[in-house]
Image (cartoon, rainbow, N blue to C red):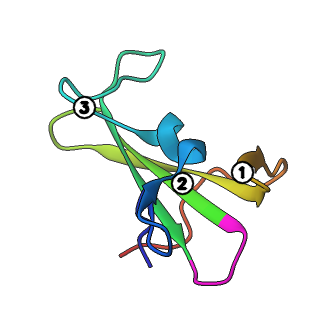
């Protein structure tokens, strides 16, 4: 399930997700590669999965995954998780 930056119960934006906001031009990795972040979550779960789809060349991309837990209104990174993507659309 993809995640929205809006709390549907209250209609307000979730400040914890602002770190994943993107605009034009697309964000870039420290190496200069453009990427798109897709967020996944489940209803009634505190876990959030962020997949960064990094464009390495016109024909080649890689997917890097990060896992977070909601702690109140903050996100806490879960360390020791594999960096390759495990879930997709």
Mark 3 or mark 1: name the one nearer the start of the chain.
Answer: 3
For label 1, the crowd category at 10 Å Cα-Cα, with few meaning under 14, some 14 to 19 and many 20 or more, is few
Whole-Å distance between the Cαs marked 3 and 1? 23 Å
Residue in the picture at 68% in, 56% down: 67
Residue 55, visible in the rendered structure: no
- Which SS class for mark 1? loop
Q: Which residues are magenta?
A: 42-47
Q: Quadrant of the N terminus?
A: bottom left
Write the residue at 78% across / 47% down: 76
- Mark 3 is surrounded, within 10 Å at the Cα level, by few (under 14), some (14 to 19) or many (20 or more) other residues, namely few
Residue holding disc 1: 73
Q: Residue 71 appears in which quarter of the rendering? A: bottom right
Cβ–Cβ under 8 Å for marks 2 and 3: no
Q: Which mark is residue 23?
A: 3
Q: Residue 78 appears at what percent x and percent y?
A: 80, 52
Whether 19 is drawn above or below 9: the answer is above
State which mark lies toward you, 2 or 1: 1
The first of marks 2 and 3 along the sequence is: 3
Q: Nearer the viewer, residue 59 or 6?
A: 6
* Contact, mark 3 vs mark 1 (Cβ under 8 Å): no
**Quadrant for the C terminus in the image:** bottom left
| Residue ID at (75%, 59%) | 69
Toward the viewer: 83 or 12?
12
Secondary element type, mark 2: strand
Spatial CA span between label 2 and label 1: 17 Å
Which one is closest to the eye, mark 2 or mark 3? Answer: 3
């Amino acid at each position: 399930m993809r995640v929205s930056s809006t709390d549907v119960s209250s209609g307000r934006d979730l400040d914890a997700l602002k770190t994943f906001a993107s605009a034009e031009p697309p964000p870039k990795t420290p190496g200069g590669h453009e990427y798109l972040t897709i967020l996944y979550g489940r209803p009634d779960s505190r876990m959030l999965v962020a997949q960064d789809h990094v464009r390495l060349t016109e024909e080649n991309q890689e997917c890097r995954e990060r896992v977070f837990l909601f702690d109140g209104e903050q996100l806490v990174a879960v360390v020791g998780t594999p960096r390759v993507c495990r879930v997709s659309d």
